[in-house]
Each structure stands twice: as structure tokens, then as C-alpha cells.
Image (cartoon, helix red, strand yellow):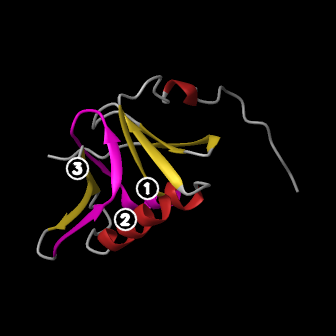
Amino acid sequence: MTTRLIDGEFPDYQRLVPDSNPNKLTANRGELFDAVRRVRLLAQEATPVRLEMSSNGLELIAKTQDIGEAHEIVDASYSGDELVIAFNAEYLLKGLEIAPGEEVTLETTDNQKPAVLKASDHPEFLYLLMPVRIS
């Protein structure tokens, strides 16, 4: 085995983690994971999955031209302004898959800034998600 030290500075990832997030969505990790998997079936490679968050809960939407669209409603509690944000389904699924515990919280500022996925029972877990721009 050979290793080599690379010259240079490692990017400051702490700058990407938002200090405060006014919008918080809390849901059962397993239910959310299963819903994203189902919606992803109609989301082709570059098609993001939209999360419409409101006081009524969470609706997941994936639309693909000439194929169709999928809608899935997930029982969740949400506090903050109504928000529509989109993520690459694979990255969202990876975060949900590795999150420990039963409940997860998705904290967002708006639909263009990074979101943070946290595990309710494990404060050391933090998963940073970059949103996809939608029109």
C-alpha cells in the first residue's frame, strides 16, 4: 500500500453548513425513504424529486416529459414558510439510507441554499444536501 500527501488546503466544508434553518420537516425515516424510492421510478437520471412542504405535511413529485408524473404524500410535521425544493433522488436516498434512528429532520433556508438532514435521536449525524434548481 502506498499513500501520498496532497499539497493544498482541504475545502472549508463548515462554510456550507447553514447556521440556522427556519424551515424544519420531521418525518419517519422509513416512510420517507420508501416514498422517495417509489417516486424516483418516474424520475429519469437528471429529473429531480420535488418536495412540497407545508403545514399539511409533505408531497413528493417527480415529472418526466413523455413518461408521466408521480405524486406521493408523506405524513410529516413541518414548521416554517411553505416551500418547494428539489433534490437529486439518489443523493436524498443515500442520506435517508444511512441516517440512524426512526425519525429524520430536513432543515432548509430556501430552495437554493444547502439543506441539512439530521437524525432526531443522533445529534452527531449531519448530511448536507444541495438542492437542484427548478423552474
Give the answer, above or below, for where 120 lies relative to 113.
below
Q: Quadrant of residue 44?
A: bottom left
Mark number displayed over residue 25: none
Contact (CB < 8 A) between labels 2 and 1? yes
State the separation of the CA atoms marked 2 and 1.
8 Å
Q: Mark 2 points at which residue?
A: 36
Q: Is residue 93 magenta?
A: yes
Is 105 displayed left or right of 35 in the figure?
Answer: right
Quadrant hosting residue 75: bottom left
Asked which secondary structure carries label 3, the reply is loop
Q: What residue type is labelled 1?
A: Leu
The answer to whether marks 3 and 2 mark residues whose Cβ atoms lie closer than 8 Å is no
Compare residues 90 and 71 and report the one nearer the observer: 71
Asked whether disc 1 touches disc 3, contact meaning CB atoms under 8 Å apart, the reply is: no
Name the secondary structure under disc 2.
Answer: helix
Q: Give the range drawn in magenta.
A: 68-94
| First-in-chain label (1 vs 3) | 3
Q: Which residue is drawn at 20% across and 47% down?
A: 134
Is 132 magenta? The answer is no
Above/below status of 37 relative to 9: below
Left or right: where 54 falls relative to 95: left
Residue at the spot of label 1 = 92
On the image, the x and y values in percent for residue 78 come to 32, 42
The first of marks 2 and 1 along the sequence is: 2
Between the residue at mark 3 and the residue at mark 2, the CA separation in whole angstroms equals: 18 Å
Disc number lying in front (1 or 3): 3
Answer few, some or many: residues within 10 Å of disc 1's Cα (few below 14, many 20 plus, some between 14 and 19). Answer: many
Residue behind mark 3:
56
Q: 98 or 30: nearer the eye?
A: 30
Rendered residue at 41%/38% (across/down): 107
